[in-house]
Amino acid sequence: MYRTHTCGELSIADINKEVTLAGWVQTVRKFGSITFVDLRDRYGITQLLFSETLNVEMDANPLGREFVLQVKGGVNERSNKNKNIPTGDIEIIVSELRVLNKSAVPPFTIQDDTDGGDDIRMKYRFLDLRRNAVKKNIELRYAVNRAARNYLHKNNFIDIETPFLIKSTPEGARDFVVPSRMNPGEFYALPQSPQTFKQLLMVSGYDRYYQIVKCFRDEDLRADRQPEFTQIDCEMAFVEQEDILQMFESMIKDIFKEVVGIEYNEPVERMTWEEAMWNYGNDKPDIRFDIKLTNLKSPFREIPEKQQLAAATGFNVFDNAETVIAINVPGCSDYSRKQTDELIEWVKRPQIGMGGLAFIKYNHDETIKSSFDKFFNEVELGFLTDHCKAKRGDLILILAGKEERTRKAISDLRLYMGERLGLRKPEEFKLLWVTDFPLFEYDEEGNRWVARHHPFTSPKPEHIEVMINNAAEIKNADKYLEHPYANIKANAYDMVLNGNEIGGGSIRIFQKDLQQKMFTALGMSQEEAQYKFGFLIGAFEYGAPPHGGIAFGFDRLCAILGGSESIRDFIAFPKNNSGRDIMIDAPSTIDDKQLDELNIKLNL
Amino acid sequence: MYRTHTCGELSIADINKEVTLAGWVQTVRKFGSITFVDLRDRYGITQLLFSETLNVEMDANPLGREFVLQVKGGVNERSNKNKNIPTGDIEIIVSELRVLNKSAVPPFTIQDDTDGGDDIRMKYRFLDLRRNAVKKNIELRYAVNRAARNYLHKNNFIDIETPFLIKSTPEGARDFVVPSRMNPGEFYALPQSPQTFKQLLMVSGYDRYYQIVKCFRDEDLRADRQPEFTQIDCEMAFVEQEDILQMFESMIKDIFKEVVGIEYNEPVERMTWEEAMWNYGNDKPDIRFDIKLTNLKSPFREIPEKQQLAAATGFNVFDNAETVIAINVPGCSDYSRKQTDELIEWVKRPQIGMGGLAFIKYNHDETIKSSFDKFFNEVELGFLTDHCKAKRGDLILILAGKEERTRKAISDLRLYMGERLGLRKPEEFKLLWVTDFPLFEYDEEGNRWVARHHPFTSPKPEHIEVMINNAAEIKNADKYLEHPYANIKANAYDMVLNGNEIGGGSIRIFQKDLQQKMFTALGMSQEEAQYKFGFLIGAFEYGAPPHGGIAFGFDRLCAILGGSESIRDFIAFPKNNSGRDIMIDAPSTIDDKQLDELNIKLNL
């Protein structure tokens, strides 16, 4: 062992001990004939004091930042204590110095506030990982891992490894594939998730399974997506939805407690997908603040007649819109023209893509002013403010347009206002279950139904008949919403944390016939279903138990717990947005010999 | 929840409780108007008793093996107790029965002694996994996983995930590769191990790393190799070899205790690679029995002149052989002609490939008889038995031939005799460290040196000069053993358990110059080294600490602890010898669209 102690553990209790430390040079400070060096390792920083004799040596061979040292010396009480670090009461009077390795000058400083840009830090990730700011993320990730495992172990779950070289059955996202040398012309696929294997394990009787496991998706990378990512993957047999919700909200609460010391004792809120969409405009609402959407005009939902913004108002923006939706922002009625203009510009940005923004100020003096006073009198505006449950001092923001885009835009605006008003507190954690997702989603391109979650998710029991008794075919694409499948809800649920989906799952189909019906509904021929999922259909013939599960996005969960928006900060060796690891420079070309052995050639 | 209790937990203490159970039908036994059903789940078996009313229903819809049931009923004390199972004192008087799912008749019986052959059980692996014999292996695997993690956690190791999509740098085994859609013409490789990444983590200051992680090797599969396998992968910084040996023999002892209840308190034996090769003929000796090899003639080792079997004996088999090696098998001097003939046939099998076997019987009456009495008189035979340290009653077995093959053969014969004599006790666990492996291995095909462990392993400090001061070139292939590199030993070590290598590692090179010298020694040009391992050489420029590590073959470790020879039994979803998963039928062909997107085509 190169050391007797780490750089994070010596204190006043160790005074006069002879110790050996090893670590990296953080800083060198010379004062005349003595030199102070801060020595750093994973556990902390300890101050070294080199007096005259060693100083002469050091003048000949100066120490630089990031040099690796081994030093022997005595622990001494500091005259000038540093209360900011645990070892701040002591220093080591160095008697022996050994430079274990030198270091070139690092391309950026190894400090919390580094001078390195993103690219250079990705290229020298091994140096970036030395920074405390990154290290605490990696440590937090391990703490989450550990807490999850301990909880699941305590609850009788068993970690069972599922294979990485599996079969390509693209449904939704693209598979990464692996050519098989031993089976020319054939390929393995890397798993997008262990879904079918964990279901097989339920069929096998391992009624509580988990794995913290890498998954792979060959997608065009949006910001903050990684081609390989980690899931906490779980499945249970002989359970209903309620059992799963309880089991896993307890797990997340346990992780909160173990990792960030938060006692989350209140029950986790729940809402259906319908409620989430109506009240928040998206399926993963941030409920840390309670601004909700109000429909003023809607193609779907009935609105009390008196309050319906009818064509009669003469305000084309509303009259011609499919949907008009408002949010009521508390305490902003005194926004200046500049401020409302800013908001208008914000919704016009291409990412939001709205034509404009209407607003109503319900002033403290009870007057009501709107951006469309020409078309609405005070009584009519009063109807609106009433309907939006606005109070004096509130600002009502209104978007109008096509239903889907407008709902998305008002949801974004809601989050933006929450942010602007400091209502999305980073230190506050608010969990939410969203349940009863639609079973199907309409795929415009193919004019067909696709599985919203995946093809193994079960419909609500009361909707099974609808599915069995109706064909999947959509005769009139324009009216797909009138197809009976559009209203089938699934036993599917997402866990949402502060506006991020951190987990999702479902109760699965476990009956062979229903699973086959599902494949048919998704437009798979029986042959195709048999080719892709024959093993699962086969397994369902031999006594499959009722089962369900959930998978948590481990990277995302860690990022949120660590107070960051970026999962990349919580991955030791992440890839960039083109899926490259720029540190090792992968992917890369391979030898012709390798290609030949794999029976493939390039086709550029 | 479909149940109030599992099938493994009810006992006499639960009498008269109303309970709900769910599980699989193990057996159905009808006795007149009552029926007994054994209901099975992961936790055990509980007897159900169906009386008359339900029997009528069941006659109409009979239960079959592997049906999934939910039953309600009262816990009743059995009149006829079964002491072999934990629930054997009670039974459930069923009041309500719900068949959750039916089952076709399984293709083999779900019992410890199944009637299913290997192939059918692989195809229906989800049913095989129901068998208790397989389930206990999967559970043992989890117990090993858990014990290893707990030990490493306790010792300040941190689990850090390394990437799966990395760069292809084939050295030794073939990489599995993954075409990159986003980077046309380029490929990722799946890691053969996280070797370079864990070293980078040491450079980053995470001084104790571990991971239980899948690795991939595209090798022609020998029996009991899998293309994907699991490692317990560990690395430490600021350590010497001794620290690693101590840390990890404690880990294995901890696993012994936690998983199989064995207190392994004696120190782990150690021997150098040289000793292992001389005394046991291979580098992973089974030291549960102490038969050792005796060299009677050797091209390398000096043997006392008197005892050297010189050409003068006139026995061509010895005279013409490069090597003559003996083992002394205790207590077998009375082997019959039939028995010695059997041994002769055994060494002639193609797997062993020897021309014959000579033997000496040191009889209980002190007479000495050999199979080559024509050439050796009793005095000469006496020299041999003395040299082999034989005692009365021993049988000396002797092989002669080319050094390498003979050594391998006598080592195999030693194991065979150990097996035959019951000296390799399955319930006995004997650990061994083999140290000081050669740094290089001679590659005949390329007439060059290859790394015996891997290119990152450091030479013994006292051999570094030899490496630096000599070129790698081998001028005379026949005399490669005379090249200075042949005698360079490495800071490398293997852990051996009962004759199986369960782990191996080394102290790594951490100096940039030495690492570059190593690449040169292996015949890599500087450009090639830079292309493949530039990131590591780069990292060594910025303060790399001394470090080393080890990786354990997790599948193998589990198999040995579970008393099996086959790792496949300890993998939930293994592949067969052609790398196929015959359950899901992978690998398989993929769509032309997928190939096109990946910019590759088949080349069959």
Image (spheres, coloured by chain):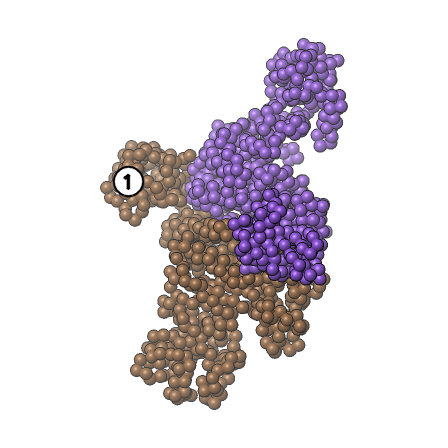
Chain colours: A brown, B purple
Q: Position of residue A601 (x, y in %)?
A: 67, 53
- Residue at the location (71% across, 49% down)? B108
Residue B180 in sight: no
Task: Count numbered badges in the picture.
Answer: 1
The answer to whether B558 is drawn above or below residue B163 in the figure is above
- Residue at the location (50% across, 42% down)? B148
**Mark 1 packing: few (<14 Cα in 10 Å), some, or many (20+)?**
some
Q: Position of residue B370 (x, y in %)?
A: 71, 16
Q: Position of residue B269 (x, y in %)?
A: 52, 28
Q: Residue furthest front?
A: B79
- The image quarter in which residue A7 lies: top left
Look at the image and tell me in which quarter the N terminus of chain B lies. Answer: bottom right
Compare residues A604 and B295 and report the one nearer the observer. Answer: B295
- Residue at the location (28% across, 43% down)? A89
The amino acid beneath tag 1 is Ile
Check disc 1 and report the residue beneath it.
Answer: A12
Residue A462 in sight: yes
Q: Residue furthest left?
A: A79
Q: Position of residue A400 (x, y in %)?
A: 47, 79
Secondary element at image label 1: helix
A133 to the left or right of A555: left
Chain bearing mark 1: A
- Residue at the location (44% across, 55% down)? A254
